[in-house]
């Protein structure tokens, strides 16, 4: 248990440790978990709620709640539906993280992709040791072994109330009967077609997708029907496993049937921290996001006197936040990787005294020179911004915060032949070469080098805040290295500036990550321009636009009433379901 306040939470740690020792895996039959009694308890909220990336997944969740399902049933239905209707990031060909709060206890499933068995440290380097451009982004070599089906199977087997087949039903229907393609998806598809042109088989499956036209995916419908009938076994050890492995047998990638058979989702201890009267439950390594979020929130709290009277998103606010962020990113680059391969110093990085020491290093007036910002624990990051997140609460007070990804929109651009499954390009989240930036412009160390079965470092930060044991906020977003800085800003907007949820999500967001030096990234949704831009530049910063704005999905609960907001930057839907 990564407890920030060890004494206070030791009892929880023991209880949770007992669960976490249960070995997890997709396995052929359902894991022998005793089902939670959650859904048989009386309702504690006025309604269930979802904030999701599209309307089809909101409809799927509504159906599941109507049939008596709980938050996990709804979450699994949403995940499979998005794999069909939000194919640019929803997936079964990728992986992710799920943070859960069930019956008053926190849980976390790591279903991140793993490097194939034959992956090697230098597989993306040429004979002179230089990174081969594009090899970790396009085509079969870019794909890690997918974990989404295993993760959903674990969650639903342990906590779901409905039958597996019932929660798969909406996805099967959308794949078989089709759904109407909206403008954003059609645009992203067209951009992907250009990007993958001549490199992958993307257009064979998606070339015909057009705005306003019904899009059917018969191969994917067949896969989902098999998974619906046979469980995760089909994906990891059945016909679907055979088809995925066959799609690489021509030497175009590394994933074999053995890779799929050996894949395991893992129940991990979530990061727990106390902040501002709330308990934060968030993602542990191999995500950097949970540690990053805790460091950001606590460093800002330590600097409360410096923030006093500073207006939200003013030049001084941007400066102070950037100073905090550069220290968090220095640690990220040095210390974070897959905890199964590398001992991540979680307790030290989230220790109050350590964070206070880092806060004391912040220069209150001018940017600290980049070269002077070293990793705080002594002697060195990678990720695409796309991904997708959804947040769910049920009327029994359970919550699921799930972020999953195929990395870039439409992942590697490879569709496993005969399956309609878009394979990820998560191998780009490894450090192909320490010190060389990945597509997010972040650099990494040996902690995140490629090894067989290792999970690449992520920034996904599915987060739940509780107060007095009750869910207060469920939040997450896509955005690569921008994920935890975005969540951090929305939490500040909500709790420090007391903005209503919709306004907190809609506010301008910005990002700094140590490198490139003194650079503040702004988003197209609310650009930094005019007088604000001039004043930030006068402080010594360079302003740079980034193509991506994030897509926060958040549910806030005041008393017994949930309020849900889907980021106006995306095509998501928030729904309160009676
Ligand atoms: N691929 C983005 C992330 O895992 O953070």
Image (spheres, grey):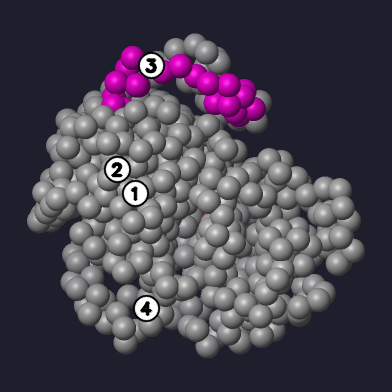
Which of the two discs, 3 and 1, sits closer to the camera? Answer: 1
Earlier sequence position, callout 2 versus callout 3 = 2
Q: In the visual, does 259 lie left or right of 303?
A: left
Q: In the visual, does 441 lie left or right of 575?
A: right
Other residues around mark 1 within 10 Å, as few (<14) / some (14–19) / many (≥20)? some
Residue at the spot x=50%, y=70% of the render? Answer: 294
Other residues around mark 4 within 10 Å, as few (<14) / some (14–19) / many (≥20)? many
**Magenta residues, start to end:** 170-192
Q: Is residue 93 magenta?
A: no
Which of the two discs, 4 and 2, sits closer to the camera? Answer: 2
Which of the two discs, 4 and 3, sits closer to the camera? Answer: 4
Q: Which mark is residue 561?
A: 1
Other residues around mark 3 within 10 Å, as few (<14) / some (14–19) / many (≥20)? some
Local SS, label 1:
strand
Are the residues at dot 4 and dot 3 in contact (C-beta closer than 8 Å)? no
Q: Which mark is residue 3?
A: 4
């Amino acid at each position: 248990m990564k407890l920030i306040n060890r004494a206070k939470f030791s009892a929880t740690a023991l209880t949770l440790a007992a669960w976490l020792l249960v070995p997890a895996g997709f396995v052929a039959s359902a894991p022998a978990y005793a089902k939670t009694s959650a859904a048989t308890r009386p309702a504690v909220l006025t309604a269930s709620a979802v904030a999701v990336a599209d309307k089809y997944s909101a409809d799927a969740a509504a159906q599941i709640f109507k049939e008596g399902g709980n938050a996990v049933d709804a979450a699994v239905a949403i995940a499979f539906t998005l794999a069909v209707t939000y194919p640019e990031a929803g997936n079964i060909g990728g992986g992710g993280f799920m943070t859960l709060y069930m019956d008053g206890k926190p849980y976390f499933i790591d279903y991140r992709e793993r490097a194939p068995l034959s992956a090697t440290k230098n597989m993306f380097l040429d004979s002179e040791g230089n990174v081969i451009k594009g090899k970790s982004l396009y085509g079969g070599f870019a794909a890690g072994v997918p974990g989404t089906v295993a993760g959903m199977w674990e969650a639903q087997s342990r906590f779901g109330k409905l039958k597996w087949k019932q929660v798969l039903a909406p996805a099967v229907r959308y794949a078989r009967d089709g759904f109407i393609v909206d403008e954003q998806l059609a645009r992203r598809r067209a951009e992907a077609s250009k990007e993958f042109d001549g490199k992958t088989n993307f257009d064979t499956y998606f070339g015909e997708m057009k705005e306003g036209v019904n899009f059917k995916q018969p191969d994917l419908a067949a896969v989902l029907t098999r998974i619906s009938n046979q469980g995760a076994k089909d994906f990891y050890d059945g016909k679907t496993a055979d088809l995925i492995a066959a799609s690489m047998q021509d030497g175009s990638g590394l994933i074999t049937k053995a890779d799929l058979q050996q894949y395991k989702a893992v129940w991990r201890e979530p990061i727990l921290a106390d902040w501002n009267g709330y308990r934060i439950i968030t993602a542990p390594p191999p995500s950097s996001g949970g540690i990053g979020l805790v460091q950001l929130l606590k460093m800002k709290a330590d600097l409360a006197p410096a923030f006093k009277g500073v207006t939200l998103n003013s030049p001084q606010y941007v400066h102070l936040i950037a100073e905090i962020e550069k220290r968090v990113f220095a640690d990220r680059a040095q210390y974070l990787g897959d905890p199964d391969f590398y001992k991540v110093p979680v307790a030290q990085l989230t220790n109050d005294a350590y964070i206070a020491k880092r806060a004391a290093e912040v220069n209150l007036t001018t940017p600290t020179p980049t070269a002077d910002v070293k990793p705080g624990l002594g002697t060195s990051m990678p990720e695409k911004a796309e991904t997708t997140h959804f947040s769910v609460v049920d009327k029994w007070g359970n919550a699921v915060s799930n972020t999953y990804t195929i990395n870039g929109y439409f992942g590697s651009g490879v569709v496993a032949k005969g399956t309609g499954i878009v394979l990820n390009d998560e191998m780009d989240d490894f450090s192909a070469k320490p010190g060389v930036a990945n597509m997010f412009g972040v650099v990494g160390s040996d902690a995140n080098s490629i090894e067989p079965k290792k999970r690449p470092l992520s920034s996904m930060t599915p987060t739940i805040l509780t107060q007095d044991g009750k869910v207060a906020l469920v939040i997450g977003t896509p955005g690569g290295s921008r994920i935890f800085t975005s969540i951090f800003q929305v939490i500040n907007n909500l709790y420090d500036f007391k903005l209503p949820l919709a306004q907190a999500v809609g506010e301008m967001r910005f990002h700094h990550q140590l490198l490139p030096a003194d650079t503040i990234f702004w988003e197209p949704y609310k650009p930094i321009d005019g007088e604000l831009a001039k004043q930030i530049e006068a402080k010594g910063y360079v302003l740079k636009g980034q193509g991506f704005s994030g897509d926060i999905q958040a549910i806030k609960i005041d008393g017994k009433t949930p309020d849900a907001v889907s980021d106006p930057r995306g095509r998501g839907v928030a729904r309160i379901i009676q």
